[in-house]
Image: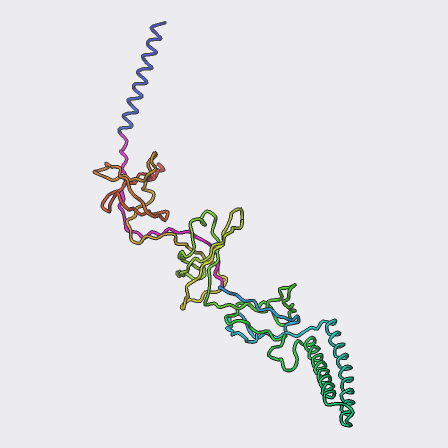
Amino acid sequence: MKKSVTITILLLIVLVFGGSMYYLYQKNSEDPVVYETEKLSRQTIVKKAVATGSILPLEEVLIKPNISGVIEEIYIEGGDYVKSGDLLAKIKVVPNLTALNDARNTIEDAKITLNDQKRNYERQLTLFSKGVISKADLERAEVTYDQAKQAYSAANKRFDIVNTGTTSGYRNAANNLIRSTVSGMVLEVPVEVGNQVIESNNFNEGTTIAAIADVEKMIFEGKVDESEVGKIKEDLPLEITVGAIEDKTFDAVLDYIAPKGKEENGAIQFEIKGTLKKQDTVFIRAGLSANASIILARADSVLALKEALVQFDDDTKKPYVEVETSEQQFERKDIELGISDGIFVEVKSGIDQKDNIKVWNAIEEENAN
């Protein structure tokens, strides 16, 4: 019994020893790992944040009527340039029956008063010619008569204004003639002939007849995520790309960051605005979607390394790379880094352009065989 146990143990020892030797043999027979190397290169590195938005006029003026009615004529269309005071549209007034009736009654009252003052003036004139009253009394009667005539004329003009929107002597200032209040390009005419419009007052913003803006002064208006807003500040340069205009970048300056964010789709977004520098060769249409690259930092023609080649010490968290000293022999060197764009990182010191840097994290391709 003891003899069989001993033999079994010996056999197990032999098997384990043989297996270990076979494993070591297989391990030593594998091809050694060959690390590739790369060198530093000259790069222009731009660190930036991205915002999405659109191109809008700096100032857009909405032209609204100060009288209600129906559009009778339109004299402009989108894309036209107008000057302040140019005629845009004409409105046919639909009078309010209550106001029209009040104006008519005012005319009747003024006419009765005028007739009464006329008779009084003629009577006073007769008495004055006979020497019964003084000239001062006659002049007072004349003034009262003139005031009655003025009131009657004003009542008739008020009736015309209520009924038609204008009156004789005020054609250029008529309520039914809509004129531009600014100079610029007509961006939009949202009404057509026959449309009913509402006047602008304290209780209603009114119907927009036309939108006018100076297209020489455009801005980028967009939004950035809360994770990026802490990195940006006013006066940073922007590079604007417009989807509808290929191979063209527009320069701008960030001049507004909203102090309060708004929640959109579960994330807090902050509004930003940037003024575009004037472009004489390219016409940018209002409302075009655009992306803005906010330039946080920039380093031109500096020594740079792929960020993937940088390693970090487990204890100190300081960056380092492995530099080839001889064939497949590497030495650790601590380095000082500058700005990064996510692909390349600036190397300020620690290595130079002639060093071969170990590609330590290369992904080996697996053969299908």
Q: In this view, does 108 lie above or below 16?
A: below
Which residue appears farthest toward the bottom when viewing the image?
130
Which residue appears farthest toward the top when viewing the image?
1
Question: Is 143 on the left or on the right of 82, as rendered?
Answer: right
Question: Is 255 on the left or on the right of 321, as rendered?
Answer: right
Nearest to the observer: residue 178 or residue 243: 178
- Is residue 31 within the magenta segment? yes
Question: How many labels, in total?
Answer: 0
Nearest to the observer: residue 216 or residue 125: 125
Q: Position of residue 2 (x, y in %)?
A: 35, 5
Decide whether the magenta segment is chiefly helix, strand or loop. Answer: strand
Q: In this view, does 282 lie above or below 18?
A: below
Question: Is 147 on the left or on the right of 56, as rendered?
Answer: right
Which residue does the image show at 28% across and 22% down from the upper left? 21
Which residue does the image show at 51% across and 51% down from the upper left? 260
Q: Where, by quadrant of the figure, is residue 9 drawn?
A: top left
Nearest to the observer: residue 170 or residue 40: 170
**Magenta extent:** 29-56
What scheme was used to colour the molecule?
Answer: rainbow
Q: Where, by quadrant of the figure, is residue 335 drawn?
A: top left
- Is residue 106 within the magenta segment? no
Q: Quadrant of the N terminus?
A: top left
Q: Position of residue 134 (x, y in %)?
A: 74, 90
Nearest to the observer: residue 108 or residue 306: 108
Q: Quadrant of the C terminus?
A: top left
Q: In this view, does 19 lie above or below 365?
A: above
